[in-house]
Amino acid sequence: MSENRFSGKTAVVTGAASGIGAAIATRLVAEGANVVGIDIAEQALDTMATTLGTAFAPHRADVAQEAQVAAALDAGAERFGSIDLAFNVAGASRVAPIVDLDEKDWDFTVDLVQKGVFLCTKSMSHVESFLKQVSAAASCRKPVKCSAWRS
């Protein structure tokens, strides 16, 4: 793989402070990208920023909170000039047999995994550089009548 295949690109990575998100962020920076790292774990984000340097912009945000997501994406686009890629990988769950789960536990997982992707994608739609990328990709496919994207 080219060490600079993402040179000049900016990626948003949710769940960037640990696990898969941290691995993706680390790889993207290694391959030349700037990364807007979003997570609720502020201390772990700071550690990632120290490790990855100025190409990593940490933003503490709960992906299930629209205003926090929008603020993080706006700050990232302001810092790096564009957003070109999105990796919505924030995820967690409260593990227990289903009969022992509270509704709050279920809501936690659904909000993080589903609502978080929805809100991040929705918030990125107003970032002009990202919208152009999505629109160009969509123009190569047969339109889907149930799509949330409008032209």
Image (cartoon, rainbow, N blue to C red):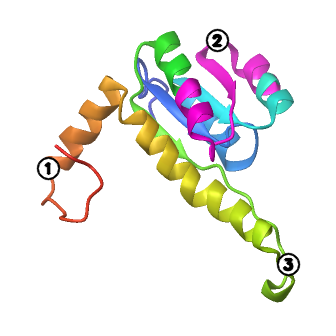
Q: Which region of the structure is painted magenta?
A: 47-72
Q: Which numbered tag is attached to residue 140?
A: 1
Which residue does the image show at 48% across and 51% down from the upper left? 118
Magenta residue check for 60:
yes
Rounded to the nearest whole Å, what is the CA distance between mark 2 and mark 3?
Answer: 40 Å
Vertical position of residue 2 compared to residue 79: above or below: below
Residue 68 appears at what percent x and percent y? 62, 32
Circle 3 residue: 96
Mark 2, mark 3: which one is toward the viewer? 3
Residue 89 on the magenta span: no
Callout 1–callout 3 Cβ contact below 8 Å: no
Where's the C terminus, which quadrant?
top left
Quarter residue 82 falls in: top left
Q: Is residue 134 above or below residue 37?
A: below
Using residue 73 as the reference point, say whether residue 43 is left or right of it.
right
Task: Let me know if residue 82 appears in the view.
Answer: yes
**What label does residue 54 carry, if any?**
2
